[in-house]
Image (spheres, helix red, strand yellow):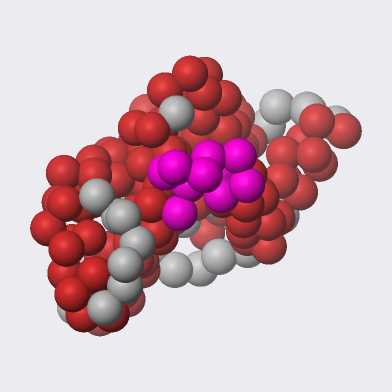
Amino acid sequence: MLDFKIVQFLNHLNLGFLGRVLEFLNRVVVLTFIVALIFALIIIFDHKNGWKVVLMALLALGFNFLVVNFLIKFLLPMIGLSRVRPYLAHPSSIHSIGELATDSSFPSGHVSVVTTIMTVVISYYRQYWPLALIFILEVAFERMYSGMHYPSDVLGGALLGLSFGYTTILAWSPISLLINKLFSVKINLS
């Protein structure tokens, strides 16, 4: 019930122009562009670790998509385990804003993706953690404001994102050895 009340409150905020900006920034194509820009900046400005950070983030993102999009949002609903999005569950109380999604509300894919990537990025560029946190919080806020997710969906997405990012960081050393061996590359990925 608290989940619903929070989404309802946020969904009824009159943000005007700011609301339209938030909705624009959270479109999949815009988020993809922002992430690509972050990756490009990392590669351009960090000649020592840039490619490694981007490869780690992409690997973590692959794990994220496998678990969140395939296992949780595709397979589990086949056996009746899914959560209806707030705007669909409460159409008279919550209106949808922006791109509509009808798959399972839990977890927030947007938040899990952004948190996964930012976890890896911040492990190398700690000085940028405030920007990463603002990015994650902006996405989380907009997903609730737009009526797409409950707070528990957003929290679940953030926790999953942290786990994918952190697990990839911890497992990177053996993974990089495997990549070098499989593809006979001479890149220092460790």
Where 149 falls versus 36 (above or below)?
above
34 or 16: nearer the viewer: 34
**Image quadrant in which you'd find residue 120:** top left
Q: Which residues are magenta?
A: 42-51
Left or right side of 54 for 158:
left
Residue drawn 16% across and 69% down?
178
Q: In x, y percent, where is residue 162?
A: 29, 39
Question: Which quadrant holds residue 99?
Answer: bottom right
Relative side of 176 to 56, left or right: left
Which residue in the rendered view is the most extreme toward the right?
Answer: 17
Image vertical order of residue 145 relative to residue 6, above or below: below
- Which residue corresponds to the image point at 56% horizontal and 49% vertical from the top-left? 43
Residue 98 picture location, percent across and down: 71, 55
Residue 3 magenta-drawn? no
Main secondary structure found in the magenta portion? helix
Residue ID at (52%, 23%): 128
From this viewpoint, is residue 144 visible? no
The x and y percentages for residue 182 are 21, 80
Q: Which quarter of the rendered picture does the N terminus lie within?
A: top left
Q: Of residues 53 and 3, which is closer to you in this image? A: 53
The residue lying toward the viewer, choosing from 7 and 65, is 65
**Residue beneath the point at 44% across and 42% down:** 48
Q: Residue reaching furthest front?
A: 186
